[in-house]
Structures are given as structure tokens and as C-alpha cells.
Image (cartoon, rainbow, N blue to C red):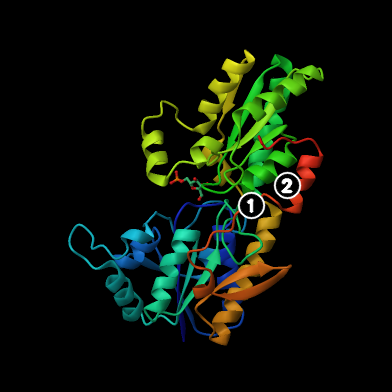
Amino acid sequence: MLRIGLLTSGGDCQALNAAMRGVVKGLSANVKDLEVYGFENGYKGLIYGEFRLLTSRDFSGILTKGGTILGTSRQPFKLMRTPDENGLDKVEAMKQTYFKLNLNCLVILGGNGTQKTANLLREEGLNIIHLPKTIDNDIYGTDVTFGFQSAIDIATDAIDCIHTTAASHNRVFIVEVMGHKVGWLTLYAGIAGGADIILLPEIPYDIDKVVEAIHNRTKDGKGFTILAVAEGAISKEDAALSKKEYKAKVAEHKYPSVSYEIAEKIKEACGTEVRVAVPGHTQRGGSPCPYDRVLCTRLGSAAAKAIMDGEFGCMIGMVNGKTKRIPLGDVAGKLKMVDPDSQMIKEAKRMGISFGI
Ligand code: F6P
């Protein structure tokens, strides 16, 4: 008898169900006696013993279904060692649930924070496999995370739609793209959507250079400009502040996000109409794109193989087109960021895209 647990934690994305389907189909086709326990709402389900026994029927027809059939929640890693409001030791509670169910392995799908807790559970002696989920693509050790390509499609669609209205009205438009503290999603969607200016957290912008890029387009007879701005974009002045100073500055901001601050500065400097469009959580919604369906099927199937081989304590990543078992201890807590000196950034610059520097 093989007993596995599954949980999805952190922000959702389009391909979580596809990945779980990959794991379970990969196992059920090869293991005679299989029990699959699905923990509800992320680590919460593991802490409080909220789970359900799943059958192969639960994994049928979910390849194309966005969200997660298990539900998810954010349980910050930094609070994992802090008892809950009733004094419950969360880590001990998770271990108890795992051992009470006599699980052979727990498959955890999630992003960076989720991965840190997965690694903690590994250190506590649990058999863990992590699958790298996030639209942000910021997980270290894998070339790509699932959810990323699907989110690129949506963010690119948003920029495409803005193009026509920006051109009709001769306006400057900012499309604010998700991605937390990294710029992968903005970089890819910005290039795919033909944005004129792309602002990323990894390349602190100079507002004068942003304004100059808009002026140059106007001089060239272009009536509109599109900026793809990462939600984590930061000015060079703000990047020079300490973490504490920056937090204090953000706390007294009147702007809902960085895009509105940039919009106001552009309006002041250029005197043009500026609009901000925020696709927000639509970027995590809907069906996974075909690329993500294939990626998740491969990662899920590779996870099933690792479980059958009895190899745990790893993330199943994609490296140079091949699935790979990467020790969790080597990657947990590290962030994969856009390299400002990378070939891709240089190529984009050569095309005339401004990064505000
Ligand atoms: O990590 C995925 C992500 O969508 C980020 O891009 C974004 O900053 C964050 O989650 C939003 O979190 P929430 O869904 O909690 O608002």
C-alpha cells in the first residue's frame, strides 16, 4: 500500500490541478494499492487534519481546470514556528497528521514560501516532494515554474487590448503586471505585447529616462506609449533607501501601487493623458495554457517516478528541457531574479525598448 498526501499552498495558478493529475495518474497506472489524501486549503489542512480521501475520479477532467480542487491559503513560513491563537504548535501538528495517516510521502505544490515550509518538514523527517508553482517564475533551481506561461498569455492579452485604445486616444498607458518582487512576467508579457517601456524590480528606473523615452516617441510621431510595469518596480531613489526607510515611505504613499505614482510623474512632465490598467488576479485565473498542461503533466509524472523510486526531499524542476530532482536544501530560500545583464535584456534594449535607465 502506498499512501500519499497532496496539498496546494500560497497563491493559486492555472495549472495546479494539471500537476496533481500528473502525479496521481503517474502513480495509479503503476501502483496497485494507492491511497491519496488531499489536504484542504494548503498547510491549514495538514495542521488541523482537514483532508479527504480522493479517488482517481477526482483527477479526471481537471487537466484544463484552473484554480485548485483542494483549495489553498497563505500560511507564512516565518509564522510556522509561532503557535496559533490556541497555542497549537503548527509544525508538530503537521507531523502528527502525517504520521497518523501513515503517509509514505507528501507532495506539496507551491511557490517560494511554500517551498521553505516544505524544506522545514523535510528537516523534521517527513518524505517531501515539492512541485514549483507560481506565475512569478521566481523559484531557484528550475528553468520555469508552472502558471508562468499561462499568466504571460493573460498579461500579454491585456497589453494587446490596451494597444488599440491607447492608439485611438493618443494616450500613455501603464499596464501593471504581477510578479511580486521579480520581473519575469512583466519582461515576457512586455516583450510579447510590444510594450515601449518595461520597468522591472531588478532594474531600478530613473523617471527622467522614462519621460525621455516617451518624448522620443512623440518626436518620432508616435501618439501613444505603452509601459509594462511590474508591481514590484522601484525607482532608483527608492532602491537606494534602507528596507526600513522604504517601508515608511510606502506607508505614507497616497498611491494604490507604483504605477499610479509613475503615471502622476509622467503626467506632470509630459502633460499627456496617462491611464493605468491593472489586470491583477485575472493573471492567475482561467485554464492553463497548453505549455503549462504539458509542463505539469511532465513534472507530475516525474514526481510519481521519484515517489516510486523512494527518492524524497527534492523539488521536481525542469532544467534544459529535462525534469530533474533538485535537493530542497539546495534551493529553499533562494530567489530566481531577472539578470539585468542577460542576453534577453540586451536584445530587448537593442530593439529600442526602454528599461527606464
Ligand atoms: O505569487 C503570486 C502572486 O500572484 C504575486 O504575483 C502577487 O504579488 C501575489 O501573488 C498576490 O497575492 P494575493 O493573491 O494574496 O493577493
Under mark 1, the amino acid is Val
Which disc number belongs to residue 345? Answer: 2
> Depth check: 99 or 279 in front?
279
> Depth check: 119 or 3 in front?
119
Under mark 2, the amino acid is Ile
Residue that extends furthest to the top in the rendered view of this protein:
271
As helix, strand or loop, the secondary structure at mark 1 comes to loop
Please identify the quarter of the rendering in which residue 53 is found.
bottom left
> Depth check: 291 or 324 in front?
324
Residue plotted at (28% across, 73% down)? 92
Please identify the quarter of the rendering in which residue 210 is found.
top right
The residue pinned by badge 1 equals: 338
Residue 12 seen = yes
Residue 195 location (% of width, % of height): 71, 34
Q: CA distance from mark 1 to mark 2?
A: 9 Å
- Disc nearer the start of the sequence (1/2): 1
Going by the image, does 13 lie left or right of 250?
right
Q: Quadrant of the C terminus?
A: top right
Residue 115 location (% of width, % of height): 47, 65
Q: Is residue 253 above or below residue 168?
A: below
Going by the image, does 144 lie left or right of 346?
left
Residue 60 seen = no
Residue that extends furthest to the left in the rendered view of this protein:
86
Residue plotted at (73% across, 32% down)? 196
Please identify the quarter of the rendering in which residue 124 is found.
bottom left
Which disc number belongs to residue 89? Answer: none
Q: Are marks 1 and 2 in contact (CB under 8 Å)?
A: yes
Residue 121 location (% of width, % of height): 39, 74
User: Are there few (<14), some (14-19), or many (20+) residues within 10 Å of tag 2?
Assistant: some
User: Are there few (<14), some (14-19), or many (20+) residues within 10 Å of tag 1?
Assistant: some
